[in-house]
Image: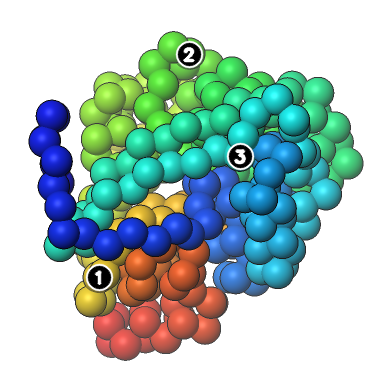
Amino acid sequence: MPAAGETVSGGEFFSALGGKGANQASAAARLGAQVSFVGCVGSDAYGDEIRRDLVANGVDATFMRVVDAAATGTALINIDSNGENTIAVAPGANRRVTREQIEEAIEALRPEILVVGFEIGVAAASHALAIGRERSLRTICNPSPIDLTDSSWILNSTTIVVNETECQAYGGALSLLERGAGDVVVTLGANGARRYKKDGSHEEFKAFSVEALDTTGAGDAFCAALAVSDDPIFAGAAGALATREVGARASLPTRSEVEALIREQQQ
């Protein structure tokens, strides 16, 4: 990885579809869930491609709006020889999601589960989670990228899914529980995952062994699988399988693939 002010040469470039919300929606759909995506894209070729891809993956894109005032959100991802990554995001149209759009979508869709991330901005995400709690939905918050300007989302989250860095930034799992979270699931990469419960106890979940080429999107696959199953073992297997190819969407697994990996490595 390049350090500040450093140029590193010799890599290869390619572009692929991403976005945490779109990754999670696609992953959940591939795992058999009925999924609708709520968000915004720009009036550009990327936005058109994203809509086509979501629909092709079985995701309802009725509430994906096109805005003229901003480009489709884009991320620059550096991947090292070990498959680890760093990501810089230009959110663009993601930040044009409105409270009215969220309210309209939830009213029309009447979902059982609401999965929310911070690429749409913490204010919009917090509003969505508040509505979810009012409607007694199972609300899952993946508070990434990190935003410390508002903490109201914590109280309205049935489950918070964070990696180690994010967990520390938000004060730790126990602090999140004290501030109202239902439970907290911390992803630990090659070390598996840990689930902290309201009573102060926690469970450890071992990682699955796969040949990882790219960890981009693994956390999104984990989050989606947790939404579908509420089972960190199932989520861990989905996250592991999502590292098999380069790109966040290229290796999102099916339910049968996840179940096969669990049978193989937990016998």
Front position among marks 3 and 1: 3
Label 3–label 1 contact, CB within 8 A:
no
How far apart marks 3 and 1 lie (CA) works out to 29 Å
- Give the residue displayed 16% in from the left and 59% down from the top: 10
Report crowding for label 3: few under 14, some 14 to 19, many 20 or more residues within 10 A (C-alpha): many
| Residue found at the very far top of the displayed protein | 149
The residue to which callout 1 is attached is: 212
The image quadrant that residue 60 belongs to is bottom right
Residue at image coords 27%, 62%: 12
Q: Are marks 2 and 3 in contact (CB under 8 Å)?
A: no
The numbered dot on residue 150 is 2
Nearest the viewer among 90 and 103 is 90
In this rendering, the answer to whether 63 lies above or below 181 is below
Q: How far from the left and from the top, in percent, is residue 39? A: 68, 39
Q: Amino acid at mark 1?
A: Ala
Q: Is residue 159 left or right of residue 58?
A: left
Q: In the image, what residue occupies the spot 66% across and 50% down?
A: 45
Can you give x and y, in whole percent of width and height, for residue 238 in the image? Answer: 42, 68
Q: Nearer the viewer, mark 1 or mark 2?
A: 1
| Kind of residue at badge 2 | Asp
Residue 215: x percent and y percent?
A: 30, 59
